[in-house]
Amino acid sequence: MTETKLRPLEDRVVILPYESDKKAGRIYLPDVAQQPACRGIVVAVGPGRVVGINSDGQLVTTPMGVKTGDTVVIAWSGQVKTRSGQVLNAWNGQVVKDGDTEFIVLRMSEIICVVEGVAELSSIP
């Protein structure tokens, strides 16, 4: 799996996106549901959103619902048109480059679901 030097803060997650096909394990997505959904591998997870300080003076955070190595589906937010007129799919979160690799950094709440039972994807750089 790809390593990154990115360290997400609070409830943010760093995801390595990859092209999704029409099948997710044994789940078939019909053509009507073919809005582009982005799947990706979680490569880094923040500590959780800070909700307070306990009596010992330590930060109290919300637990994160994903862990490094999980395959997730993230929300599609529409399409954007660049200055050159090219139309691109837009995902929630922020696209960040680390070397030659592009990652998506987003909040935990922008992850739609975790895909269970997916075999390790050795083809991902």
Image: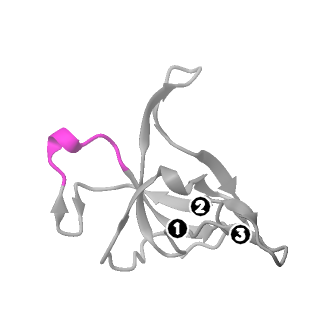
Q: Which mark is residue 57?
A: none
Circle number at residue 13: 2
The amino acid pointed to by label 2 is Val
Tell me which label, 3 or 2, sits earlier in the chain. Answer: 2
Say if residue 60 shows up in the picture: yes
Marker disc for residue 60: 3
How far apart are the two marked residues, 3 and 1, measured between alpha carbons? 23 Å
Q: Secondary structure at mark 1?
A: strand
For marks 3 and 2, give the CA distance: 18 Å
Q: Position of residue 19 (x, y in %)?
A: 38, 55
Q: Earlier in the sequence, mark 3 or mark 1?
A: 1
Q: Could you give the CA–CA distance between mark 2 and mark 1, rounded to whole angstroms?
A: 7 Å
Give the residues drawn in magenta, as a range. Answer: 29-37
Pick the residue in front: 99 or 91: 91
Taking the magenta stretch, the answer to whether it contains residue 105 is no
Are the residues at dot 2 and dot 1 in contact (C-beta closer than 8 Å)? yes
Q: Give the total of numbered labels.
A: 3
> Residue drawn at (71%, 69%), measured in percent from left and top?
60
Q: Name the spot of residue 12 as percent of width and height, x first.
A: 62, 58
Tell me, yes or no, whether the two marked residues, 3 and 1, touch with CB atoms within 8 Å: no
Which of the pair 75/36 is nearer the observer? 75
**Residue 56: which quarter of the image?**
bottom right
Residue on which the image places disc 1: 42
Provide the secondary structure element on which disc 3 rests: strand
Kind of residue indicated by mark 3: Val
Q: Residues within 10 Å of mark 1 (few under 14, many from 20)?
A: many
